[in-house]
Image (cartoon, helix red, strand yellow):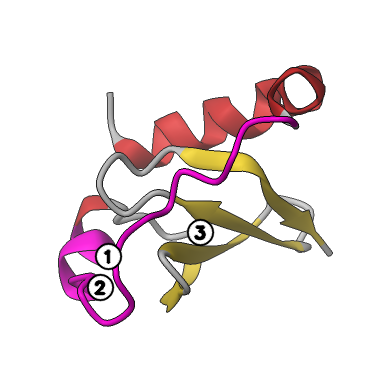
Amino acid sequence: MKPLALLALTLVGLPLAVPAQASQPSVCTTQTGSVDLSDIKTRLQGPNITSVEQWGGCVRVTIRKPDGRLSEMLVNPQTLQVVPGGVIVR
């Protein structure tokens, strides 16, 4: 499954999943500066992604939703899975 589709599926199921995962610790343990953002951008390729940047041990991905609003997600740089509580919708 493509990473962008995986992120979209994660967003759809997030309202049900976040309460169950809220007590889990963050899964972003990558050292600051050790993330290859160009590789992550390639793995997350898609027209809705507006930015990808390192944020602590995580990667912050900003996407434009179909309604024009922006959504930010903190993802694990190795798995590209959204971390628990890692979605911000503006």
Q: Amino acid at mark 3?
A: Asn
How far is the residue under mark 3 from the one under mark 2? 17 Å
Instruction: Indicate whether 90 appears above or below 74.
Output: below
Residue placed furthest toward the bottom: 33
Q: Secondary structure at mark 3?
A: loop
Classify 40 as above or below 12.
below
Does 24 sit above or below residue 26? above
| Residue tagged 3 | 48
The type of residue carrying mark 1 is Lys
Please rate how many residues cluster around mark 1, counting C-alpha atoms within 10 Å: few if below 14, some from 14 to 19, many from 20.
some
Magenta run includes residue 79: no
Which of the marked residues, 3 or 2, is nearer the chain's N terminus? Answer: 2
Mark pair 2, 1: CA separation? 6 Å
Q: Which is nearer the eye, 58 or 52?
A: 58
Q: Which residues are magenta?
A: 23-42
* Residue 9 in the image, given as x and y percentages of width and height: 55, 25
Q: Nearer the viewer, mark 2 or mark 1?
A: 2
Residue plotted at (28% across, 33% down): 2
Q: Can you give x and y, in whole percent of width and height, for residue 87 in the image?
A: 69, 50
Describe the element under mark 1 as helix, strand or loop.
helix
Mark closer to the observer (3, 2): 2
Q: Amino acid at mark 2?
A: Leu
Verify CB contact (< 8 Å) between mark 2 and mark 1: yes
Identify the residue shown where x is 41% and y is 65%. Answer: 57
- Mark 3 and mark 2 residues within 8 Å of each other at the beta carbon: no
Which of disc 1 and disc 3 is earlier in sequence? 1
On residue 37, the disc is 2
Under circle 2, the secondary element is: helix
Q: Kindly identify which residue carries mark 1.
A: 41
Separation of marks 3 and 1 at Cα, in angstroms: 12 Å
Quadrant in which residue 41 is drawn? bottom left
